Amino acid sequence: MTTPALTRLDDRASQDRTPQDRMPYGSGRWLQVRASTASAEIVGQIRQRLFDGLLKPGDFVGTEGSLSIEFGVSRITLRDALRILEANGIVEVKVGKAGGVRVAHPNPERFADALAVQLMLAGISETEIFDAQMGAEVRAVQLAARTATQEDIIALEAQLARCVDAVEDAEGFVRESLAFHLCLVRAAHNRALLAQFQALRHLSWRAIARTSTPTRSRRVLERHRSVLDAVKQHDAERAATLIGEHFQQIIDIHAAMRAEQIVNEANA
Amino acid sequence: MTTPALTRLDDRASQDRTPQDRMPYGSGRWLQVRASTASAEIVGQIRQRLFDGLLKPGDFVGTEGSLSIEFGVSRITLRDALRILEANGIVEVKVGKAGGVRVAHPNPERFADALAVQLMLAGISETEIFDAQMGAEVRAVQLAARTATQEDIIALEAQLARCVDAVEDAEGFVRESLAFHLCLVRAAHNRALLAQFQALRHLSWRAIARTSTPTRSRRVLERHRSVLDAVKQHDAERAATLIGEHFQQIIDIHAAMRAEQIVNEANA
DNA sequence: CTTATTCTAATTAGATAATCATTAGCCTGT
DNA sequence: ACAGGCTAATGATTATCTAATTAGAATAAG
């Protein structure tokens, strides 16, 4: 709530502010646009409303038709702005009789998505991903050991049981294990950590699946069991140490595989 | 429509349809129909190319005209897709003779923006932010203690000196301190951790600035000094412990201020 | 009579087409 | 060297059509 100065982070909308524009002849709810790109100006105005606290999730903003009139632009230009706002997770657009533009409901997955794209573009190595994931998750289990509810524990036990069932199926076990880690992070009740974990999860999936064998799976299972026990006993330090070692093992195995691969390529 | 080939992977974070997990085939259920708009389909295909490693920053993708022909849609529909891709930071669009669509260069600032929107909508607490930041930074200094180069150390010393100079100016000290933390994370040479830190940095700035006093600044300075010493001695464990305690202090102070504020509001 | 279901019509976004305006790099002619 | 025109690209408009969604009326069942 106390973040009024953040709206300036938007790239396009900030560079072309000319508040000296002619005043509205329209209904006065929105300023009519005269900027470098009209759609960016519209995005900026609606963002501003959100950060000024004038818009709350679920609020009806208008229809494409009505908004295009209010902003004084064509419907297509307004649609351009809506696509940007939608991609930014600021509004939701529905078709049909009761359709139109509404302020979006929060969706942490969206931040995870943005982060994943940037990591991809930057060409970040798998080692970097694992290290970052370790940071988020060590903190998460520390918190989980303190704040996990009974439901969290039940979910974790259930997920661990699914891991046991899948122990012979290498790929299935990796999937269930990731779900277990997700349950752990959820138990921390921290949406920022959850978003970070989700962002990295998709990227590390493949790398982990490559190194999976039934023997390793059984070792991982033991480790998961002990982490869960520590969380259940509210022993934050032990839980953090255990999950840290767990990640270090993953990193080491991955580094070994990587080295082996390089040797093989050199021989070939 | 030319090719509806790529229909896999759950990249619809921009156009969130049902996030419902797929059900098994056998249990009397049908496979969910892939109902999406043409522009979302185009976004999905280009995203897929990025995640398959077929697109690198700076690559020329095409012009609006050529792409609309290749995808078999009108130019306006393609523009809708481009607005979404642009908002996601996947492509950059330039006007003019040598213009067109190119794969974007990574821009960490974009996280801060995406995160700010989601925090605004979800109302994530500052405590959650601090906890997440703590996770990333503890891991970062651990790595920094192992991997920091001579240049990193020089940069850290220089930044610490600037902190010393600003110790009497509350706001200036917070700014220089944040820069010090940034140097620490940089010294870890992990872009994923750096990106996470950058995303959270803007959000915690104000909260930290509120709790700043010269007395506290001097204590913070000591702590920074000791962290840097640990990093210089390659003592990862001590560095991690120290920075963890440092964050815990920040969290505690913030919680105390928060409590005080609530009491004041109740009395008023 | 009440409740559940089906139809229908109104509303709204999705998409197309043709066209003009604006921008920016390139190139030519003095 | 540089002014000015050429050209290829996006930005924006208008008009029109299609597809999706739902409120509400009509209808059937209990």
Image (tube, coloured by chain):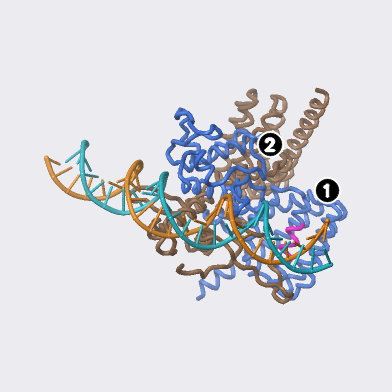
Chain colours: A blue, B brown, C orange, D cyan
Quarter of the image for residue B173 reads top right
Q: Nearer the viewer, mark 1 or mark 2?
A: 2
What residue appears at the point 73 percent right and 65 percent down from the top-left corner?
A177
Label 1 crowd bin: few (<14), some (14–19), many (20+), radius 10 Å: some
Give the magenta-colored segment's residue range: A177-183
Q: Is residue A228 visible?
A: yes
Return the x and y of residue A137 as percentages of the image width and height.
72, 53
- Is B132 above or below relative to B42? above
Q: Position of residue D2 (x, y in %)?
A: 22, 36
Instruction: Give how far across and how far down residue A38 sits, in percent.
Output: 46, 41
Query: Quick check: is A180 in the magenta stretch?
Result: yes
Residue A12 sits above or below residue A108 on the image: above
Residue under label 2, please give it. A1
Residue identifier under label 1: A146
Q: Position of residue A230 (x, y in %)?
A: 84, 56
Q: Are marks 1 and 2 on the same chain?
A: yes
Say how many tags the image has.
2
Given residues A64 and B86, the one toward you in this image is: A64
Question: What's the amino acid at mark 1?
Answer: Arg
Q: Few, some or many C-alpha atoms within 10 Å of disc 2 (few <14, some 14-19, many ≥20)?
A: some
Overall secondary structure of the magenta section: helix
Q: Is residue A108 above or below residue A223?
A: above
User: Is residue A194 rendered magenta in the image?
Assistant: no
Decide which of tag 1 and tag 2 comes sooner along the chain.
2
Image marks 1 and 2: residues in contact by CB distance under 8 Å: no
Instruction: Report the chain holding disc 2.
Output: A
In-image side of A120 versus B211 (left or right): left
For marks 1 and 2, give the CA distance. Answer: 26 Å
Q: Residue at x 66, y 55 (%)?
A: A198
Q: Is residue A201 left or right of residue D11?
A: right
